[in-house]
Image (tube, helix red, strand yellow):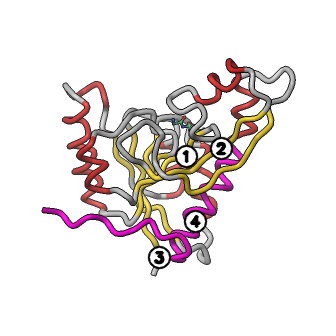
Amino acid sequence: MVLTVAVLISGTGSNLRALLDATDDPGFPARVIVIGADREAEGLAHAEAFGIPSFVVPWERFDSREAWGAELDAQLKVWNPDLIVLSGLMRLLPHDVVATWSPNIINTHPAYLPEFPGAHGVRDALAAGVTETGASVIVVDDGVDSGPILAQERVPVLEGDTESSLHERIKPVERRLLIDVVRRIAEGELDLGARPSPN
Ligand code: GAR
């Protein structure tokens, strides 16, 4: 059976694109069935290119994180994916959404967690003056990038690195880790556990 995946983005979706390229191979055990965003993200163009449905739940149209999350949850339930991948979604999910889908929500992060969580993982690593940072794929929990780590790898910080040059070196590592984690989940090699039954 093929694992069905929903991907949520906010930005250019270059990691999403890599996942789409991988899952486009008929031999890959997972399929992206829908792509969602919290804004008219540039990366939604990849959905169109691959003929995959997409939806936007615009953050600014809701009064609260909870109201935004309820609509996001409703959209996700239309598709009922086996797995949700946050691939550059720059919003914290409200508790109810995490509780509904956990542990089948994973997130990519451009740092070696628990180092440098949050929205500016690359910038924070540079500011700290570390000689290496990394990339991580984690299970989403109620905290900020605090869930169980599924895969991670170190990436060196080079002399003269800017936030952008470092991020561009981290992203290919994130992509490789993400694709591998999705494959391992799909093949049953990595068991995230069952979703709690709805009450
Ligand atoms: C990726 O590096 C992802 O890990 C990061 O945003 C980038 C999205 O790039 N996410 C976070 O920092 C979440 N805390 P992309 O839109 O080009 O795939």
Per the model, the C-alpha gap separating discs 2 and 3 is 26 Å
CA distance separating discs 3 and 1: 22 Å
Magenta part of the protein: which range? 171-199
Q: Secondary structure at mark 4?
A: helix
Asked if one can make out residue 83 in the rendered structure from this viewpoint, the answer is yes
Residues tagged 3 and 1 counted as in contact (Cβ below 8 A): no
Q: Tell which circle, 2 or 3, labels the residue nearer the N-terminal end.
A: 3
SS type, badge 2? strand
Q: Residue furthest right?
A: 159
Q: Is residue 66 magenta?
A: no
**Residue 132 image offset from top left, x and y in percent:** 76, 34
SS for dot 3: loop
- Residue type, mark 3 in image: Val
Image quadrant holding the N terminus, namely bottom left
* Residue bearing the label numbered 4: 23
Residue furthest left as drawn: 199
Residue linked to disc 1: 108
Mark 2 surroundings within 10 Å by alpha-carbon count, few (fewer than 14), some (14 through 19), many (20 or more): many
- Circle 2 or circle 3, nearest the eye: 2
Q: Left of 128 or right of it: where is 11?
A: left
Disc 2 target residue? 135
Residue highlighted by disc 3:
2
What amino acid type is highlighted by mark number 1? Thr
Amino acid type at image mark 2: Ala
Say if disc 2 is inside 8 Å of ligand 1.
yes
Tell me, yes or no, whether the two marked residues, 1 and 2, touch with CB atoms within 8 Å: yes
The secondary element bearing badge 1 is classed as strand
